Amino acid sequence: MKTVILLFMVVLLSANEVELFEKLFSEMFNKKEIKVYTKYKNFNSKILKKVTSCKEADIVLGELNCSKPKFVLSYADFKNDSKVIGAFYWRKGRPQLRLRKNNILNHHLYLSKDFSEYLE
Protein backbone atom coordinates (compact mmCIF):
# COMPACT_ATOMS: atom_id res chain seq x y z
CA MET A 1 0.00 0.00 0.00
CA LYS A 2 2.81 2.41 0.90
CA THR A 3 4.43 1.75 -2.50
CA VAL A 4 1.19 2.60 -4.32
CA ILE A 5 0.84 5.89 -2.44
CA LEU A 6 4.47 6.79 -3.05
CA LEU A 7 4.15 5.96 -6.74
CA PHE A 8 1.05 8.14 -6.97
CA MET A 9 2.96 11.06 -5.40
CA VAL A 10 5.83 10.63 -7.87
CA VAL A 11 3.50 10.75 -10.85
CA LEU A 12 1.27 13.63 -9.85
CA LEU A 13 1.56 16.86 -7.91
CA SER A 14 -1.68 18.78 -7.57
CA ALA A 15 -2.06 22.33 -8.84
CA ASN A 16 -2.54 23.58 -5.27
CA GLU A 17 0.77 22.06 -4.19
CA VAL A 18 2.58 23.66 -7.12
CA GLU A 19 0.99 27.02 -6.23
CA LEU A 20 2.25 26.66 -2.66
CA PHE A 21 5.75 25.85 -3.94
CA GLU A 22 5.61 28.87 -6.27
CA LYS A 23 4.79 31.22 -3.41
CA LEU A 24 7.21 29.67 -0.93
CA PHE A 25 10.20 29.25 -3.25
CA SER A 26 9.81 32.63 -5.00
CA GLU A 27 9.83 34.26 -1.57
CA MET A 28 12.82 32.25 -0.34
CA PHE A 29 14.97 32.99 -3.37
CA ASN A 30 13.56 36.43 -4.25
CA LYS A 31 13.64 35.57 -7.96
CA LYS A 32 11.13 35.58 -10.79
CA GLU A 33 12.20 32.12 -11.97
CA ILE A 34 13.35 29.33 -9.66
CA LYS A 35 15.11 26.30 -11.09
CA VAL A 36 13.89 23.09 -9.43
CA TYR A 37 15.62 19.72 -9.67
CA THR A 38 12.94 17.06 -9.17
CA LYS A 39 11.87 13.60 -10.33
CA TYR A 40 8.16 14.50 -10.37
CA LYS A 41 6.65 14.31 -13.85
CA ASN A 42 3.72 16.74 -13.69
CA PHE A 43 5.48 19.87 -12.65
CA ASN A 44 4.13 22.73 -14.75
CA SER A 45 4.58 26.26 -13.55
CA LYS A 46 5.31 29.74 -14.84
CA ILE A 47 7.66 30.54 -11.95
CA LEU A 48 9.22 27.14 -11.23
CA LYS A 49 11.34 25.72 -14.02
CA LYS A 50 12.18 22.02 -13.92
CA VAL A 51 15.86 21.33 -14.64
CA THR A 52 17.64 18.06 -15.35
CA SER A 53 20.76 18.46 -13.22
CA CYS A 54 21.68 19.48 -9.71
CA LYS A 55 24.23 22.02 -10.95
CA GLU A 56 21.52 24.07 -12.68
CA ALA A 57 19.07 24.00 -9.75
CA ASP A 58 18.30 26.54 -7.07
CA ILE A 59 16.43 23.94 -4.98
CA VAL A 60 15.80 20.19 -4.91
CA LEU A 61 12.25 18.88 -4.52
CA GLY A 62 12.17 15.30 -3.28
CA GLU A 63 14.76 12.75 -2.27
CA LEU A 64 17.61 13.32 -4.70
CA ASN A 65 21.31 13.59 -3.88
CA CYS A 66 22.36 17.18 -4.36
CA SER A 67 24.13 19.85 -2.31
CA LYS A 68 21.43 22.48 -2.97
CA PRO A 69 18.66 23.28 -0.44
CA LYS A 70 16.29 20.30 -0.27
CA PHE A 71 12.52 20.34 0.22
CA VAL A 72 10.78 16.97 0.71
CA LEU A 73 7.25 15.61 0.42
CA SER A 74 7.02 13.31 3.42
CA TYR A 75 7.28 13.66 7.17
CA ALA A 76 9.62 10.65 7.40
CA ASP A 77 12.11 12.27 5.00
CA PHE A 78 11.87 15.55 6.91
CA LYS A 79 12.41 13.84 10.25
CA ASN A 80 15.30 11.63 9.08
CA ASP A 81 17.30 14.24 7.14
CA SER A 82 18.54 17.11 9.29
CA LYS A 83 19.73 19.06 6.21
CA VAL A 84 16.25 19.44 4.71
CA ILE A 85 14.90 23.01 4.73
CA GLY A 86 11.23 22.01 4.71
CA ALA A 87 8.51 19.52 3.94
CA PHE A 88 4.99 19.44 2.58
CA TYR A 89 2.96 16.30 3.25
CA TRP A 90 -0.55 15.08 4.03
CA ARG A 91 -1.52 13.83 7.50
CA LYS A 92 -4.99 12.50 8.26
CA GLY A 93 -6.29 14.13 5.08
CA ARG A 94 -4.88 17.56 5.95
CA PRO A 95 -1.96 19.36 4.33
CA GLN A 96 1.05 19.99 6.57
CA LEU A 97 3.91 22.43 5.96
CA ARG A 98 7.06 22.40 8.10
CA LEU A 99 10.12 24.60 7.72
CA ARG A 100 13.48 24.49 9.51
CA LYS A 101 14.53 28.02 10.35
CA ASN A 102 18.22 27.24 10.93
CA ASN A 103 18.61 25.40 7.63
CA ILE A 104 16.84 28.19 5.75
CA LEU A 105 19.18 30.75 7.31
CA ASN A 106 22.25 28.57 6.62
CA HIS A 107 21.40 28.71 2.90
CA HIS A 108 20.94 32.51 3.11
CA LEU A 109 17.27 32.28 2.16
CA TYR A 110 14.47 34.61 3.26
CA LEU A 111 10.94 33.99 4.53
CA SER A 112 8.25 36.55 5.29
CA LYS A 113 6.03 36.52 8.34
CA ASP A 114 3.36 34.73 6.26
CA PHE A 115 5.29 31.50 6.84
CA SER A 116 6.44 32.13 10.42
CA GLU A 117 3.85 29.79 11.94
CA TYR A 118 5.41 26.87 10.03
CA LEU A 119 8.97 27.44 11.29
CA GLU A 120 10.67 25.11 13.76
Image (cartoon, helix red, strand yellow):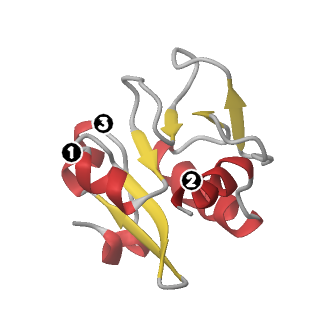
Residue 1: image location, x then y, percent: 56, 63
Residue under the image location 68 percent in, 58 percent down: 18
- Please state which amino acid type lies under the numbered disc 1: Ser
Q: Is 14 rendered above or below residue 49?
A: below
Q: Mark 2: which secondary structure?
A: helix
Label 1, label 3: how far apart the Cα atoms are: 14 Å
Mark closest to the chain's N terminus, 1 or 2: 2
Q: Mark 3: which secondary structure?
A: loop
Residue 32: image location, x then y, percent: 66, 42
Q: Nearer the viewer, mark 1 or mark 3?
A: 1
- Please state which amino acid type lies under the numbered disc 3: His
* Left or right relative to 60: residue 116: left
Report if the CB atoms under discs 1 and 3 are less than 8 Å apart.
Answer: no
Q: Nearer the viewer, mark 1 or mark 2?
A: 2
Q: Which residue is mark 1?
A: 82
- Please state which amino acid type lies under the numbered disc 2: Thr
- Which is nearer the eye, 12 or 55? 12
Residue 95: image location, x then y, percent: 52, 77
Q: Is 97 rendered above or below residue 91?
A: above
Q: Residues within 10 Å of mark 3 (few under 14, many from 20)?
A: few
Q: Is 41 rendered above or below residue 100?
A: above
Q: Mark 1: which secondary structure?
A: loop
Residue 28: image location, x then y, percent: 45, 49
Report if the CB atoms under discs 2 and 3 are less than 8 Å apart.
Answer: no
Q: Quadrant of residue 21?
A: bottom right
